[in-house]
Image: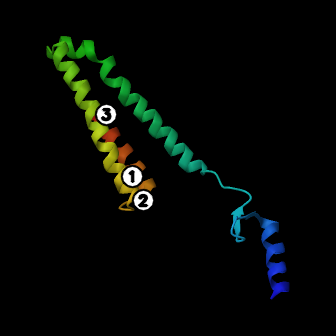
């Protein structure tokens, strides 16, 4: 048994980092942690760009909304507040979906960005 244990430890230390614990148990950790893939990073950059476009859409069109639709500053402020509140109320819902495993995290990012993109195009 001792020989098997030593050969296992030698095998594990070649590909993994062995971390001794206080109780004498060895914890094994990958020595080369994987980063996010190119597709995921590209998708996250696109979502970030869409978020930035949505955040500047309303302030950039305030003058046009005032003159074309006859809205007052109070109406425009309420629109901005509703946009912010909708985002603040939606964030915990998406977080609960992700934490409880209702949906995969990638699906949440894709669905959220598609919904936000559609709403941005409608505005």
Q: Is 28 in front, or is 30? A: 28
The alpha-carbon separation of the residues under discs 1 and 3 comes to 18 Å
Q: Residue at x 34, y 24 (%)?
A: 57
Mark nearer the viewer, 2 or 3: 2
Q: Is 81 in front, or is 5? A: 5
**Percent of width and height locating residue 45:** 51, 39
Which quadrant does the N terminus fall into?
bottom right
Q: Is 8 in front, or is 72? A: 8
Q: Residue furthest front?
A: 23
CB of mark 2 within 8 Å of CB of mark 3? no
The alpha-carbon separation of the residues under discs 2 and 3 comes to 24 Å
Task: State whether residue 96 appears in this view.
Answer: yes
Task: State whether residue 123 appears in this view.
Answer: no
The residue beneath circle 3 is: 120
The residue beneath circle 2 is: 104
Q: Residues within 10 Å of mark 3 (few under 14, many from 20)?
A: some
- Check the image and report above or below for 63 versus 1: above
**Percent of width and height locating residue 53:** 40, 29
Which quadrant does the C terminus fall into?
top left
11 horizontally vs 67: left or right = right
CB of mark 1 within 8 Å of CB of mark 3? no
**Percent of width and height locating residue 22:** 70, 64
Specify which label sits upstream in the sequence, 2 or 3: 2
Query: Which type of secondary structure does the marked residue at label 3 adopt?
Result: helix
The residue beneath circle 1 is: 108
């Amino acid at each position: 048994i001792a020989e098997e244990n030593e050969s296992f430890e030698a095998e594990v230390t070649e590909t993994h980092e062995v971390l001794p614990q206080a109780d004498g148990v060895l914890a094994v950790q990958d020595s080369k942690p994987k980063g996010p893939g190119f597709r995921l990073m590209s998708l996250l950059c696109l979502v970030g760009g869409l978020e930035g476009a949505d955040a500047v859409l309303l302030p950039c069109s305030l003058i046009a909304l005032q003159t074309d639709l006859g809205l007052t500053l109070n109406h425009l402020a309420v629109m901005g507040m509703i946009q912010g509140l909708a985002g603040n109320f939606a964030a915990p819902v998406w977080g609960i979906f992700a934490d409880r495993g209702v949906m995969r995290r990638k699906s949440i990012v894709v669905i959220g960005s598609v919904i936000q993109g559609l709403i941005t195009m409608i505005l």
